[in-house]
Amino acid sequence: MSAPSREEGSKEEEKDEEANRLLEEAGAVSSSEEDVAYEAGEKILVADFDFDTVDDATVPPFSWKKLWLFTGPGFLMSIAFLDPGNLEGDLQSGAIAGYSLLWLLMWATVMGLLIQLLSARVGVATGRHLAELCRDEYPHWARLVLWFMAELALIGADIQEVIGSAIAIQILSRGFLPLWVGVLITASDCFFFLFLENYGVRKLEAAFAVLISIMGLSFAWMFADARPNRQELLMGILVPRLSSKTIRQAVGVVGCVIMPHNVFLHSALVQSRKIDPNKKGRVQEALNYYSIESSAALSVSFMINLFVTTVFAKGFYGTKQAKDIGLVNAGQYLEEKYGGGVFPILYIWGIGLLAAGQSSTITGTYAGQFIMGGFLNLRLKKWMRALITRSFAIVPTIIVAIVFNRSEASLDILNEWLNVLQSMQIPFALIPLLTLVSKEQLMGTFRVGPVLEK
């Protein structure tokens, strides 16, 4: 009896193993049918350099090497704080309100940092990005409304970004290339940068680091040339001031700093690092490093926005040109005010604007892929999703370039109202984020406390 029983037992074990294998394969197939931000092979492995035997619940000690490996998503996210829409808001804020709205710029950046940290928290703790979570947690009608509003905000931001790049190309070509040609160039070279992703996430992040450096150097050069009043600059940062004449500029500052599509983007970007959401120590470690990196990235973006605002505050506040100045004619006004020099300020402005436009256009396309794929669960190749996302923005942008290019004033007014549109779209990204990040069933121990929930 013993021999047959052992034989039957071994057969049962084989059946169990086969059943488990089939279940694993079924799970792999079902997961592959869902759209994900990054495939497993694309994620960056963050290894323990000094401590190999740390248990899953313990947060490993701080490591500079690990901070470097986690550096990247925050700087990609910070691009949305530096797009041409922001520069439009900065220059008009400086020209019309002087230094008086610098405090609002600072606190809007701080608020933006808090929102982005919550976005990263959702992505790391759940292993899924915000658009995917909205798809699963909300009813069908609410999901479609949120998707539509996210796409609308993205199209508005994309129009500013592509038009900004086209204006920069027009400046650097000395007016030889018309605006609509610049739009087509910007739309096509976006795919070149996205092609870098095929060589790894780090290559794409390095390309963005170069573009941010170009922006920083260009606008810092302008700041050094303009030499704004230091006392007024400090007063503008430390003393809150707001008048009825600067309300529209104030709303624009908030709208162009806190970008709705960026909330969705950051929750996906943080998944480029291989983190197991079931290991609490690793999740907390990732959140710590992402907090440091995001804070550094937005500090850089704040300084660049500060440079642009103060340059135009010094040169044009209280002048007749203040109400007429905008993204289209800003370079000409700068050249008239500060002169040519060894390297004309017009071209410094054009180079900085081009870097801002190109980088933000790419991140906009990136965000569009995550938003569309997450909400609609579209399983498409990356180039196809990028083409669809680009088409959503390029068609209305070309129409804008043709219709509104008849006068400088009409294009600048459009940019102003697009910034206001961003402000109106903020709740449609912020409410789902705050709702989901405070949900214990979803976040577990990483849900936010009662202070943020309120």
Image (tube, helix red, strand yellow):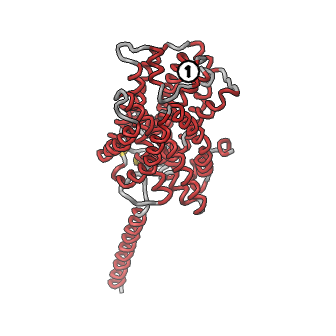
User: x%, y% of residue 289?
Assistant: 47, 37
Q: Is residue 362 left or right of residue 437?
A: left
- Badge 1: residue crowd in 10 Å (few <14, some 14–19, many ≥20): some
Residue drawn at x 38%, y 78% as measured from the top left: 12
Is residue 331 at all visible to an observer of this figure?
yes
In the figure, 256 relative to 268: above or below? above
**Residue 338, image quadrant:** top left
Q: Nearer the viewer, residue 115 or 246?
A: 246
Q: How many marks?
A: 1
User: x%, y% of residue 16?
Assistant: 39, 74
User: Is the N terminus in the top left, top right, bottom left or bottom right quadrant?
Assistant: bottom left
- Furthest residue toward left: 199
Residue drawn at x 35%, y 34% as measured from the top left: 177
Q: Which residue is mark 1?
A: 321
Is residue 289 at all visible to an observer of this figure?
no
Q: Nearer the viewer, residue 48 or 364?
A: 364
Q: Nearer the viewer, residue 417 or 447?
A: 417
User: Is the C terminus in the top left, top right, bottom left or bottom right quadrant?
Assistant: top right
User: x%, y% of residue 315?
Assistant: 53, 16
Q: Nearer the viewer, residue 418 or 191?
A: 418
Disc 1 marks which amino acid?
Gln
Q: Is residue 7 left or right of residue 438?
A: left
Residue drawn at x 57%, y 54% as measured from the top left: 146
User: x%, y% of residue 73?
Assistant: 43, 40
In the figure, 165 relative to 278: above or below? above
Q: Secondary structure at mark 1?
A: helix
